[in-house]
Amino acid sequence: MVMRLDARQGDFDARFADLLAAKREASADVDAAVADIIAAVRARGDDALIEYSARFDRLELTPETLRVTPDEITAATLACEARTLEALTLARDRIRSHHARQMPKDERYTDAIGVELGHRWTAIESVGLYVPGGTAAYPSSVLMNAVPAKVAGVPRVVMVVPTPDGRLNPLVLAAAGLAGVDEIYRIGGAQAVAALAHGTATIAPVAKIVGPGNAYVAAAKRRVFGTVGIDMVAGPSEVVVLADASGNADWIAADLLAQAEHDTAAQSILVTDSADLASEVEIAVERQLSLLPRKEIAGASWRDHGAIVLVEDLKAAVPLIDRLAPEHLEIMASDDEALAGMIRNAGAIFLGRHTPEAIGDYVGGSNHVLPTARSARFSSGLSVLDFVKRTSILRCGPDQLRAIGPAAMVLAETEGLAGHGRSVALRMNL
Amino acid sequence: MVMRLDARQGDFDARFADLLAAKREASADVDAAVADIIAAVRARGDDALIEYSARFDRLELTPETLRVTPDEITAATLACEARTLEALTLARDRIRSHHARQMPKDERYTDAIGVELGHRWTAIESVGLYVPGGTAAYPSSVLMNAVPAKVAGVPRVVMVVPTPDGRLNPLVLAAAGLAGVDEIYRIGGAQAVAALAHGTATIAPVAKIVGPGNAYVAAAKRRVFGTVGIDMVAGPSEVVVLADASGNADWIAADLLAQAEHDTAAQSILVTDSADLASEVEIAVERQLSLLPRKEIAGASWRDHGAIVLVEDLKAAVPLIDRLAPEHLEIMASDDEALAGMIRNAGAIFLGRHTPEAIGDYVGGSNHVLPTARSARFSSGLSVLDFVKRTSILRCGPDQLRAIGPAAMVLAETEGLAGHGRSVALRMNL
């Protein structure tokens, strides 16, 4: 039975706090192993990559076969069904159009005393994209990471993907081709992250690494952070559905289960002011569960981490949702816009009864890489901004230096940095 | 004698690569100690903070005296010289005006098929600002971190600052007052970071932690990353001056030394196409060094990490500078705008002979928290964007779901996520 919380009951605050504090993912202690792997790749480059691929992926590689050839990408694309390629192309085009609007603008202006200020955005020169192998090899994730990088103008996008027993998902290659990925290497794990960060004879290093991965990949990204940029370390996925009595119990149950089928550590929560809807959804979830091929995973997620929270009215749910800071928030209520406007912390909001989160996962156009594990309190979903950086620009002339230089000299003096003061004073002939 | 490199000589590439690879800062291995400190603060809260302050800062605190009172802030402000307060106020106002222009805009639009897309920016609900104690307690850094947070609309900005032997720099308190910091606690080190991330009885937790600190603080920030957001972990400061023969050797030398006086690990590099200027600057640096109170520090930095790079022409310097990716780049050359436009990787560019970097440190208005250690390849200086986050918004109606839903169903099927497909299919009555 799923956890039920009622805001009108005395133990609500304590139980809601428990829900917030529950750790859904065991953090495997893999850091020492990852440190060794990174050191080996730094010391022995391609040879280390080849050894690890043989050991972990049962795949014999040479420096010449590390890279996936253009012919392989073409062949993979030709092997895809037409309707799949069409769907991928629709998704690619919608992601591209939406993200093109995110490109930030350069600025340059002169202030009241004549100081010129501004900034210029430039694309990161090279980006590595980690793509998990096996069952979690999602072509949609390739699009969601690679398309914004290309929209930002990143000249070199490098994909790494482990190929256990030599098997590569052709859809992943097709998506990479559609997204304009420039280089693909058939390596994975911490060793692939190390190769991207530090480079080998075959793989030139990149400036930033993005994309999801297992505990080894996450630990490796943390370790190389600083040498390269990294994106958020993603945790298990989660959804909160906020619905009033008008909500369709079947549709809501389907959305909760779509989240739950990702992972036993995924989390699906319904928040409603309708006790009837709460009960109907609980029943509908049990009924629909039996229909799902991944019912074991979805059932475990719902049983262990799912929750139904009953509130007095939906406005009273807003502070609860801000504390949950969900990756995905669906709002199905008559005043959905007003409620959305009150929420501070959510990765993405899906408005209305006809916007299941799965639309956002694939073809909405917005990005499906979103902050998990309450990190929407301080971070945002992936966007073009993750693939550009800003250089600030400042210009003074003699008059401006005379106007603001003395204040700089006073502050330099108070901070004990006489050399700073001198660099201003010399130009003012003081 | 400072290192000199000449792009026309055969060993240039190897020597430039050495310059890039040189590690300027010993990375103290403090991680185990930091893990213990964080665990103690999580387990024993205020008591642990009080014990660590007694041990590391020789300061006896109680839960009641952890927080700096408004009266103390007022008293510190009254104790400052008028000219200092005026300079701080000028800096605060210029930082505020400039950063107000960085506030990103919300967006909402309807695409060709009627899907509504958009995003909404919201301020992070609470931010912690770490301020180092002792000689590195810079009031200008308080302004550079706290003002953008307040411009972004962060309701709660919490400052922590260690107070060895109970001593607090009054200028730091005055700057915090001017910047609108909401709470100040007299604690520092990894224990202060732990308190900000996890909270104690006295200190409510924050959602993000920014600000510079020593190796313990940096290690603690890395460890709490995920529970809270963090900013870049800053390394030693650096400047590259790009100058043609018109450069004033004395001014350039002063700028190189202003950088060098920060820290023996700081780095100052002149890149020029004029052998005469190179020699004049080298002589001017030696002459000016003797005038600096911090000549030991500046001299060590210049001797150990400084460099003069001679190039054929300044355009040829652009790829070298992109590889250095300097925190600060000064350009003093007739075609400074054209050169600036060619640079991809720099934290901030200072244009013209009358823009010493020290102006940007204090009163220019742009932020002085900038990416160090080549991280300008993938990251930007601090801005209002670091204190807000984006929630994406998506809305479909029945017509839009019919238009793009089938493609989502195809992709869900190929990824083996039948529950995703069902959540769309149910609404389409398929």
Image (cartoon, coloured by chain):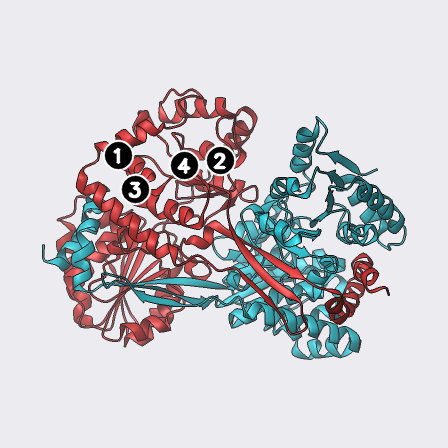
Chain colours: A cyan, B red
Above or below A101: residue B184: above
Sequence-earlier tag: 1 or 2: 1
Please rate how many residues cluster around mark 2, counting C-alpha atoms within 10 Å: few if below 14, some from 14 to 19, many from 20: many
Q: What residue did someone put label 2 on?
A: B196
**Cα distance between the residues tagged 1 and 2:** 25 Å
Please rate how many residues cluster around mark 1, counting C-alpha atoms within 10 Å: few if below 14, some from 14 to 19, many from 20: many
Sequence-earlier tag: 4 or 2: 4
Under circle 4, the secondary element is: loop
Q: What residue did someone put label 3 on?
A: B138
**Cα distance between the residues tagged 4 and 2:** 14 Å
Left/right placement of residue B223 relative to residue B283 reads right
Sequence-earlier tag: 3 or 1: 1
Q: Kindly identify which chain the residue marked by label 2 belongs to.
A: B
Sequence-earlier tag: 2 or 3: 3
Task: Determine which of the numbered discs, if any, sits on residue B77 in the image.
Answer: 1
Q: Is residue A168 visible?
A: no
Q: Is residue B236 visible?
A: yes
Which label sits in the foreground, 4 or 3? 4
Amino acid type for the residue under numbered disc 2? Leu
Q: Measuring from the top left, give residue B166's x and y in whole percent.
A: 32, 25
Q: Kindly identify which chain the residue marked by label 3 belongs to.
A: B
Residue at figure coordinates x 55%, y 51% from the top left: A379
Which label sits in the foreground, 1 or 2? 1
Under circle 1, the secondary element is: helix
Which label sits in the foreground, 4 or 2? 4
Which label sits in the foreground, 3 or 1? 1
